[in-house]
Image (cartoon, rainbow, N blue to C red):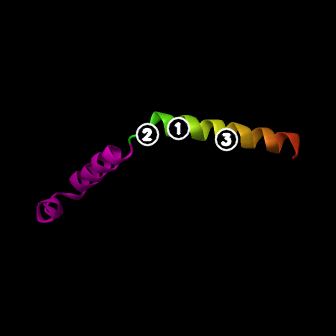
């Protein structure tokens, strides 16, 4: 598989990298929600000067 990928033109390799990266970057809705809540808490603490 690597040999085949290395034979691709640079633009094709970049496209392949993008596709592979996107396939790994599927956000978990629950984790995203937890981080959003944590960010809001931290913002409020910062805003209130605590």
Residue 21 horizontal/vertical position (percent): 34, 50
Magenta span: 1-25
* Callout count: 3
Label for residue 4?
A: none
Label for residue 39?
A: 3
Q: Residue at x 73, y 39 (%)?
A: 41
Q: Identify the element where label 2 is drawn.
A: loop
Label for residue 32?
A: 1
Q: Let me know if residue 35 is in the magenta part.
A: no
First reached walking from the N terminus: tag 3 or tag 2: 2
Residue 41 left/right relative to 32: right
Q: Identify the element where label 3 is drawn.
A: helix
- Check if mark 3's residue and mark 2's residue have beta carbons within 8 Å: no
First reached walking from the N terminus: tag 2 or tag 1: 2
Residue 20 horizontal/vertical position (percent): 28, 49
Q: Identify the element where label 1 is drawn.
A: helix
Q: Residue at x 13, y 62 (%)?
A: 7
């Amino acid at each position: 598989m690597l040999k085949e990928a290395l034979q691709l033109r640079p633009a094709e390799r970049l496209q392949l990298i993008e596709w592979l990266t996107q396939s790994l970057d599927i956000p978990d809705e629950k984790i995203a929600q937890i981080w959003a809540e944590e960010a809001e808490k931290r913002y409020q603490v910062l805003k209130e000067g605590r």
